[in-house]
Amino acid sequence: MAYAKGMLSGLAAIFSVLILPGLIHALWNVSQEKATGIGVIRGGLGEALYSPLFWVEVLCLFAFFLATGRLSSKILRILLFWAPALIITTFGLAFVALLTFLFLRFKA
């Protein structure tokens, strides 16, 4: 179970930093440039993976999720680890699936 919590913590940390600030930054870049389409968003999110700030934020959130996953209080563990980690990971995987579908469907 410890490995599953660690993997879930890592995925939730990556998706939360990638989707929330990364998507906002990518959409802001779309409004500033003349390029359009899903490729701009995909490129902006891909660019975030090479940023050191991205990985620092991921590491901080990973430590938070890992620490809250080991709390002794069941209510706090559910509210601070299980609910956010599962929701963020589900939305993150759905977003990746959507981007993959759109990229494959509308490939130019």
Image (spheres, rainbow, N blue to C red):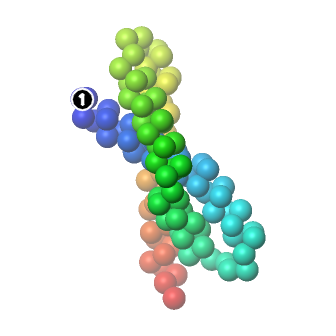
Residue 66, percent across and down?
38, 29
Q: Where is residue 45 drawn, in percent x and y?
A: 54, 62
- Is residue 90 shown to the viewer in this render? no
The residue shown at (24%, 34%) is 3
Please give left or right for residue 72 compared with residue 49 in the image.
left
Report the front residue among 102 and 61. 61
Q: Residue at x 50, y 23 (%)?
A: 79
Horizontal side, residue 15 vs residue 34: left or right:
left
Specify the quadrant that holds the N terminus: top left
> Which residue is painted at 51% across and 42% down in the image?
57
* Nearer-the-camera pick, 72 or 54: 54
Give the residue number, with chain letter if any, for mark 1: 1
Which of the 4 quarters of the picture holds residue 35? Answer: bottom right
Q: Measuring from the top left, give residue 39's x and y in whole percent.
A: 56, 75
Look at label 1 and name its amino acid: Met
User: SS of the residue at dot 1?
Assistant: loop
Q: Nearer the viewer, residue 98 or 28?
A: 28
Q: Where is residue 31 in the image (x, y as percent from the top left)?
A: 75, 69
The crowd level at tag 1 (other Cα within 10 Å; few <14, some 14-19, many 20+) is: few
Residue occupying the far top of the picture: 73
Up/down of 19 relative to 47, above or below:
above
